[in-house]
Image (tube, helix red, strand yellow):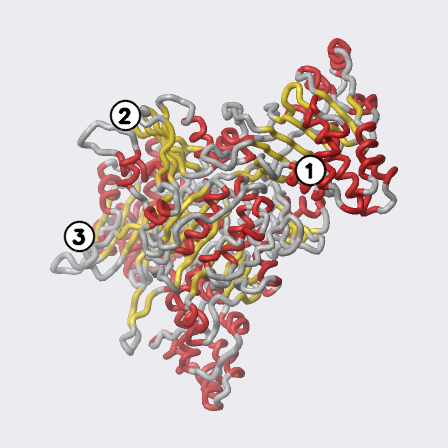
């Protein structure tokens, strides 16, 4: 948990007061100790200036990783700060940004609308589908998304710099969205500024918030030309001093690694700089993709190119590989082999936690304590000591899981050189993984030695200082056997000092005593750091000018008492330790835990810590927020712990049914473009969702209203689409908040068909007497004919009722309650999960009609589905159906489908084909299909013909009513097989299915009755009774609409 201060004037925090709000005055750092300011702080400050952003949208996932809290604090306390709009991350949440840019406000019309959003890679992935609707950017209207790269992964919620969540999102970003990536603190500040200079682009700036930009101690400056506004992105990045495709390593390399800019890229760059025959290309500008520029930087000697992609699992194809392959592959000539290297979060964690190959001359210090220990003064002393001639970098992280109360790890790196091309984040240069790299270890909370594997971080022969009241003997008794053995093997020098006792002896005031403790630890550190050249006088000369005024009078006593109180622990002989370890083998020796970075915190001022986007009063509370976020937010109840794929709590919280988030992978039109019916085939990827469905079940689509129509309505109704409202979920027992735009697009059935009760409910809000009477009349029993005309002939919607009776204007929250929610539309599933696996297919026809005035109307859900693009995510649910295969696979089945009524039968046929391939015996399968034209509307015709050839279909009756001189329908084809059909139903336990529109039901019924009368010696009445009995046995199944 990195601690950052939000108080603009507090110690250790940037004052960040600009003399001018003009970007030309940035940075404002000469008056600010920039080495005490992190790059992330500066990025927030840049983005939050009113001269830069019209508004800052802070999404919850960003604040949960410590990015956005400062912006909110500055908005409340600093002048010229942009207004802040907090939002939750849900599917489609980015539409509030789209709506603001598309419509704007009256103030936007005057000043323009440059919006900033803060979100993480996970949040950006959730917004990806919405961003496809972004309007074209301009100098007065565009979006900049600042993306701090840090993501919780695994069972321990360890924070990772992975971009795996974006693996399927980059491909669907709009062409107008530039994607730039930065890895070092200075680069991150520069590119954050540059993002606001690119006036022809929306920009997503992805930067390393996992480590680099949270580090303190960097001298950050701004050093690029300002005249880049209308340059191409790559050229602007180059003008800022960076290469869109950075090359490092051997210019005649045979092996080339290509990576997105980030921690892994820095590792590869460090390795390539010292390895012959290897080079690295670091992609700094991902969108727009520069194929020509990539080709120029790849050495002609390259024989193998390895493309590294962050992916959620090994089977996912990475976006970078696709870009690189398409840019370099030429089938007309031989070239380098291009290979994909897929980096899952687990594999990425291994790479960044094993730096043994990254040798350097830096001095590495680690201070381990608990959050209750206040080390601010100590850190200030260290920073001031090394402020001249030596670069000091510090990173503070927290672990709230492995120990009650949490653990603080302060890592400090000292080096002679300034920030340069060899930069490595502290998380890479100094991981706490037991590799023994630490030159000096200070353990301020001694009990950590009993529970955590701390000594294995210490370099052989290094000093380890334990701040404790334990005597040397007590320390040895409390050391676990494995820790003691390690101390001996590495010949560690253990020291102890009781800083609290020394401070209490010399200071009576509590505040002074706490400051004195920090000074005592500092003096002890100096003595051990200086080594053989240190003595009491040398330490005094180093420290005297840094001592606060209230301690100077007793400084000499503190220094002398500290010098005399430091004790070196005499370790026992090796053979004694080994015998002690042997003695303990009969008893269980507790496993020592490792520190795991899983928390980022922000000091919000007034003594409050903001954790996970919420103010918490203790570290126990902090752990609860991380473990149980749903308890602290108005989401759905958590599912049982045994559920392998739990409900996503934030996915349509207004719904009571189980929903799933699936990804569209195929949207293919089946009918010709010049045909008057748009019938299309959809495929959705369900991997990782837990969605299971039975053959014949229906998929509920939770569709959205058209964004443009929603924005038009908001403008007409006079509401700000970006305003956040709170409305009830289904049943009214729970409330949830979202923007007006999100509510009207994703939840409220604004363009649906109003029931009679809506007119009655709306009447009290009408201020015009005539309109009030009209609404009351339509809602009454006397107005039934008028209501029928409005609904059936005029096909009027909720929105049109409001536009017709304009004086009826309930508040938007009330209106949402009056209208109610969009109901899911159910479509028969056109696939068998036994065959397609983690996939679900649909067969859909768009619904279009014109009202009496000639105005075109479109079915809400089919319009939504028709517009889906591969990569977009859709909320779905499952509904049981009567369309079930018989329990015995040998029973005959007769399927009759008209148009898209063929959908469930495709699933039937897939499953029966699969059974046949498994060697199972399958009964006769008769398939009847009807549409108007074979050439235009023979749905899945190639599959049907293959099934006929493979004898999966015993007999097919295909009726294309408009292709011949005489209209032929499916009942005519059934009459041709009357004898067989009657026999299968009467004597062989056959099952008949009909799916499609209702109009052929009487004719099909008559065809079956006639077949039974003619071939089974039944009279008409008994034949009809027999078919009715089949309904009871679920052997005469209709699904018509």
Q: Which residue lies furthest to the top in this view?
A: 575
Front in this rendered view, residue 999 or 529: 529
Q: Which residue is drawn at 44% across and 73% down?
A: 106
Check whether the beta carbons of the residues at disc 3 and disc 2 lie within 8 A of each other: no
Check whether the beta carbons of the residues at disc 3 and disc 1 lie within 8 A of each other: no
Q: Give whichever of discs 3 and 1 has the lower sequence position.
A: 1
Q: Give whichever of discs 3 and 2 has the lower sequence position.
A: 2
Cα separation between marks 3 and 2: 53 Å
For mark 1, what is the residue?
407
Check whether the beta carbons of the residues at disc 2 and disc 1 lie within 8 A of each other: no
For mark 2, what is the residue?
301
Q: How crowded is mark 2: few (under 14 residues within 10 Å), some or many (20 or more)?
A: some
Query: Can you see residue 991?
Result: no
Q: What element carries label 2?
A: loop
User: Where does the image place residue 921, in percent across and percent down from the top left?
Assistant: 35, 33
Q: Which residue is drawn at 41% across and 71% down?
A: 109
Viewer-nearest of discs 3 and 2: 2
Q: Is residue 995 left or right of residue 153?
A: left
For mark 3, what is the residue?
935
Query: Can you see residue 859?
Result: yes
Determine which quarter of the picture holds residue 1026.
bottom left
Q: In this view, does 134 lie above or below 123?
A: below
Look at the image and tell me in which quarter the C terminus lies: bottom left
Cα separation between marks 2 and 1: 50 Å
Determine which quarter of the picture holds residue 626.
top right
Look at the image and tell me in which quarter the N terminus lies: top right
User: Where does the image place residue 221, in percent across and percent down from the top left?
Assistant: 49, 47
Q: Is residue 259 above or below residue 168?
A: above
């Amino acid at each position: 948990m990195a601690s950052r201060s939000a108080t603009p004037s507090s110690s250790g925090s940037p004052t960040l007061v600009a003399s001018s709000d003009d970007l030309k005055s940035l940075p404002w750092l000469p008056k600010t100790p920039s080495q005490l300011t992190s790059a992330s702080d500066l990025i927030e400050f840049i983005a939050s200036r009113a001269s830069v952003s019209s508004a800052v949208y802070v999404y919850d996932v960003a604040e949960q990783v410590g990015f956005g809290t400062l912006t909110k604090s500055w908005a409340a306390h600093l002048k010229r700060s942009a207004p802040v709009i907090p939002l939750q991350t849900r599917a489609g949440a980015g539409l509030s940004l789209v709506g603001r840019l598309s419509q704007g406000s009256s103030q936007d019309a005057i000043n323009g609308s440059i919006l900033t959003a803060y979100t993480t890679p996970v949040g950006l992935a959730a917004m990806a589908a919405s961003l496809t609707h972004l309007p074209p950017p301009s100098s007065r209207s565009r979006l900049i998304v600042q993306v701090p790269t840090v993501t919780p992964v695994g069972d321990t919620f360890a924070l990772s710099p992975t971009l795996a969540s974006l693996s399927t999102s980059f491909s669907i970003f709009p062409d107008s969205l530039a994607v730039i990536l930065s890895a070092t603190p200075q680069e991150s500040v520069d590119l954050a500024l540059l993002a606001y200079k690119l006036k022809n682009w929306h920009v997503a700036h992805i930067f390393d918030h996992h480590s680099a930009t949270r580090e303190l101690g960097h001298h950050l400056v701004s050093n690029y030309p300002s005249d880049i506004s209308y340059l191409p992105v790559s050229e602007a990045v180059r003008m800022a001093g960076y290469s869109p495709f950075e090359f490092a390593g051997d210019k005649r390399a045979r092996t080339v690694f290509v990576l997105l800019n980030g921690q892994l890229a820095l590792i590869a760059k460090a390795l390539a700089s010292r390895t012959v025959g290897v080079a690295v290309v670091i992609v700094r500008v991902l969108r727009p993709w520069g194929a020509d520029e990539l080709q120029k930087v790849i050495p002609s000697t390259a024989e193998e190119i390895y493309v590294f992609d962050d992916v959620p699992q090994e089977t996912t194809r990475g976006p970078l590989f696709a870009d690189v392959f398409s840019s370099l592959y030429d089938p007309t000539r031989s070239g380098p082999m291009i290979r994909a290297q897929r980096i899952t979060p687990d594999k990425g964690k291994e790479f960044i936690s094993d730096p043994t190959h990254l040798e350097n001359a830096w001095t590495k210090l680690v201070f381990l304590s608990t959050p209750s220990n206040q080390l601010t003064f100590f850190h200030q002393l260290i920073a001031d000591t090394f402020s001249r001639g030596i670069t000091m970098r510090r990173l503070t992280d927290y672990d709230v899981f492995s120990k009650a109360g949490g653990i603080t790890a302060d890592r400090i790196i000292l080096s002679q050189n300034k920030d340069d091309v060899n930069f490595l984040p502290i998380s890479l240069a100094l991981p706490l993984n037991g590799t023994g790299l630490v030159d000096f270890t200070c353990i301020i909370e001694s009990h950590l030695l009993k529970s955590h594997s701390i000594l294995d971080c210490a370099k052989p022969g290094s000093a380890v200082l334990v701040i404790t009241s334990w005597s040397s003997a007590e320390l040895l008794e409390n050391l676990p056997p494995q820790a003691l053995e390690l101390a001996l093997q590495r010949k560690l020098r253990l020291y102890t000092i009781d800083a609290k006792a020394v401070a209490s002896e010399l200071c009576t005031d509590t505040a002074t005593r706490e400051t004195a403790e920090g000074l005592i630890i500092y003096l002890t550190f100096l003595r051990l750091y200086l080594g053989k050249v240190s003595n009491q006088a040398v330490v005094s000369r180093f420290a005297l000018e840094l001592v606060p005024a209230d301690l100077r009078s007793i400084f000499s006593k503190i220094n002398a008492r500290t010098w005399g109180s430091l004790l070196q622990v005499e370790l026992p002989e090796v053979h004694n330790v080994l015998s002690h370890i042997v003695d303990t083998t009969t008893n269980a020796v507790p496993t020592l835990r490792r520190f795991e970075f899983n928390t980022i915190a922000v000091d919000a001022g007034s003594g409050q810590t903001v954790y996970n986007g919420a103010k918490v009063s203790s570290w126990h509370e902090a752990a609860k927020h991380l473990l149980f976020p749903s308890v602290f937010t108005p989401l759905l109840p958590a599912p049982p712990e045994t559920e392998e794929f739990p409900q996503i709590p934030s996915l349509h919280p207004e719904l009571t049914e189980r929903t799933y988030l699936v990804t569209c992978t195929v949207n293919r039109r089946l009918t010709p473009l010049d045909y008057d019916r748009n019938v299309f085939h959809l495929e959705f990827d369900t991997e990782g969702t837990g969605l299971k469905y039975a053959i014949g079940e229906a998929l509920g689509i939770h569709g959205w209203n058209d964004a443009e129509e929603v924005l038009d309505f908001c403008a007409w109704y006079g509401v700000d689409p970006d305003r956040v409202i709170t409305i009830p979920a289904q049943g009214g027992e729970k409330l949830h908040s979202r923007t007006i735009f999100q509510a009207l697009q994703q939840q409220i059935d604004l363009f649906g068909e109003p029931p009679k009760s809506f007119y009655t409910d709306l009447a009290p809000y009408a201020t015009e007497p005539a309109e009030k009477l009209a609404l009351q009349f339509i809602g009454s029993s006397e107005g039934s004919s008028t209501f029928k005309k409005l609904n059936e002939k005029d096909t009027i919607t909720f929105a049109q009722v409001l536009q017709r009776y304009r004086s009826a204007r309930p508040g938007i929250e009330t209106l949402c309650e009056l209208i109610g929610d969009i109901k899911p539309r159910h479509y028969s599933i056109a696939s068998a999960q036994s065959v397609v696996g983690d996939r679900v297919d649909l067969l859909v026809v768009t619904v279009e009609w014109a009202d009496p005035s000639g105005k075109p109307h479109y079915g809400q859900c089919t319009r939504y589905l028709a517009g889906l693009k591969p990569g977009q995510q859709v909320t779905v649910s499952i509904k049981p159906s009567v369309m079930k295969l018989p329990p015995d696979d040998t029973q005959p089945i007769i399927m009759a489908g008209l148009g898209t009524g063929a959908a469930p039968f495709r699933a039937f046929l897939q499953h029966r084909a699969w059974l046949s391939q498994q060697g199972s015996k399958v009964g006769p399968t008769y398939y009847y299909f009807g549409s108007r034209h074979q050439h235009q509307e023979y749905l899945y015709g190639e599959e049907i013909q293959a099934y006929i050839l493979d004898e999966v279909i015993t007999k097919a009756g295909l009726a294309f009513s408009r292709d011949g001189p005489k209209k032929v329908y499916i009942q005519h084809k059934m009459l041709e097989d009357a004898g067989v059909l009657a026999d299968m139903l009467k004597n062989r336990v056959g099952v008949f299915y009909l799916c499609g529109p209702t109009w052929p039901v009487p004719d099909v019924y008559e065809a079956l009755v006639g077949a039974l009368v003619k071939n089974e010696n039944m009279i008409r009445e008994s034949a009809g009774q027999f078919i009715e009995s089949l309904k009871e046995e679920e052997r005469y199944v209709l699904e018509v609409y």
